[in-house]
Image (cartoon, helix red, strand yellow):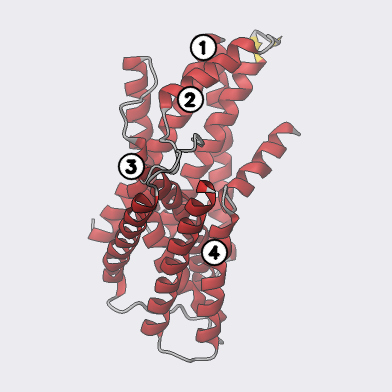
Amino acid sequence: MDGTTAALVSAVFVASLVEFVEAFTIVLAMGVTRSWKSAIAGTVTALVALTAFTAVLGLAISTWLSESLLQLTIGTLLLIFGLQWLRKACLRASGFKAMHDEEAEFAEQAQAAREADRTTYAGIDLFAFMVSFKGVFLEGVEVVFIVVTFGLSADALGMAIGGAVVAGVIVVALGIALRKPLAQVPENTLKYGVGVMLAAFGTYWALEGVGYFRADEESLSWPGGKLALIALVAGWFLVTRIVIAGLGRARTSTAIPTEAA
Amino acid sequence: MKLLKAFGLFWYDFVIGDDWKVAAYVVVALVITGALTVNGVLGDGATVILGAVLTMIFFAIGVRYDARRSRS
């Protein structure tokens, strides 16, 4: 495994870990307050839907797009996705946005579950089923997107899938052992780190893919090839530290908003 | 129908997120880089470096703008 693939697998593993922790919190809230059978049924159904979605997405983008258009498309989406994570990380680190809290999320989901009406079909509590399904599917699509884009771009789909699967197994094993929200996982720090990686890889591929607009559709070349990724990771880290430092100074005498998406 | 709506909302949230400016300045940076590429203004290396620097500058300005707006 070369350095680029190792970085890619690490990024996929950490991103998947964060998303699986969020999905686990939702399923746990439904299982504890409503019905474990219904929550697990919703989770399994979502995993089946995700498998189909992954196959279609992977086949579609690897079949229909030329190399440079593939780089441009997935690089742009990765860059936007990564910068959204980095934006939140900067605002959180400088106190302009509340930190994400799994225990608060669990309490909110559990309260909503207790207040919802109970409608059953074939012994399945539809509220617990649907909330679990939506939670796992929507968080899972983010994992699938990262796995497919990273995997195809670096020609290491198997390694990327492996990173996500290991993250999923760890979260499920810890969840079964602890039976409570995995609040000890430093999600905010991990999201910051993954945001830097997503932004760096996204910048690299999106700008390579701009070559699609040339007459020969040949990708642009970075100075130093893949070594440029190291400079991009350092660059995005430096930019975010400067932004956070600047916002920290500006925050003096500022009330902290309570948004915590 | 609810699932479709949720799926559509997910993709909107995924691409646009809670700050549409992120998607906007990424596209603007790529359009500028694309224009330079098509017209052969700079070599490959200088073009990608300029594109990366532009994206970083837009990001820093965008986050600072959001922070200032949340204070007011």
In percent of width and height, residue A26 lies at: 50, 24
Outermost residue on the right side: it is: B1
Q: Residues within 10 Å of mark 3 (few under 14, many from 20)?
A: some
Q: Which mark is residue A73?
A: 4
Nearer mark to the viewer, of 1 and 3 = 3
Same chain check for tags 2 and 4: yes
Sequence-wise first label, 4 or 1:
1
**Tag count:** 4
Q: Amino acid at mark 3?
A: Leu
Q: Amino acid at mark 2?
A: Glu
* Callout 4 and callout 3 share a chain: yes
Query: 10 Å neighbourhood of mark 1: few (<14), some, or many (≥20)?
Result: some
What amino acid type should be assigned to the residue bearing mark 1?
Trp
How far across and how far down the image is residue A225, in percent? 30, 74
Q: Which residue is mark 3?
A: A190
Q: Are the residues under badges 2 and 3 in a single subunit?
A: yes
